[in-house]
Amino acid sequence: MGESGGVRLDFRAVLPTALEVRKLLYQCIQQRRGKWERAFVVTATADALEMRRLAQELNAELVLMDTTLKECLERIRNDPQRNRSRRKFERLAIEWHEKYSKSLKKPFIPPNLTN
């Protein structure tokens, strides 16, 4: 999370620019602009529907790193760099898995790509 020594970073000032850059990159991927063979879009979204929507929009293969909650918590506990904020990371992992599980129960309605 880019934090060390207990310093809390505030990214609010650069967030709008970062989101614009992401949108432009998605457009380049969608239109296959550029001289590259592959593009990898990595996201931490916990919404399965959003994952599928983005993959469909980009005409991409969706690959889920299917790490169990137990394994995530184990990795957090074994990572000395996360000791200061261990409980925060554990809470984030639990929340992600809960949100992901709930999102799997929603029906998927593909976006209308003809507009």
Image: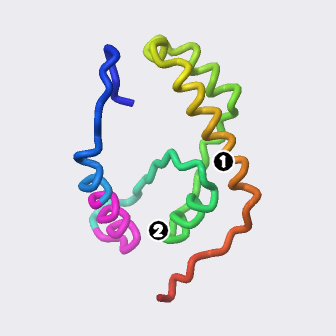
Residue 62 position (above or below residue 30): above
Q: Residue, x 61% and y 40% (percent of image)? A: 96
* Front residue of this view, candidates 29 and 107: 107
Q: In which quarter of the image is the N terminus?
A: top left
Q: Which residue lies under the disc numbered 2?
A: 58
Q: Position of residue 13 (x, y in %)?
A: 23, 46
Cβ–Cβ below 8 Å for labels 2 and 1?
Answer: no
Span colored in magenta: 20-33
Q: Position of residue 64 (x, y in %)?
A: 61, 48
Q: Does the magenta stretch include residue 27?
A: yes
Mark 2 vs mark 1: give the one in front: 1
Q: Which amino acid does label 2 sit on?
A: Leu
Give the image quarter of residue 73.
top right
* Front residue of this view, candidates 58 and 102: 102
Q: Is residue 109 magenta?
A: no
Q: How far apart are marks 2 and 1 (CA)?
A: 21 Å
Q: Which residue lies furthest to the bottom in this view?
A: 115
- The main secondary structure of the magenta stretch is helix
* Front residue of this view, candidates 83 and 40: 83
Q: What residue type is labelled 1?
A: Tyr
Residue 73 position (above or below residue 38): above
Q: Which element carries disc 2, helix, strand or loop? A: loop
Q: Which element carries disc 1, helix, strand or loop? A: helix
Q: Which residue lies under the disc numbered 1?
A: 100
Q: Residue, x 73% and y 67% (percent of image)? A: 107
Q: Residue, x 66% and y 26% (percent of image)? A: 71
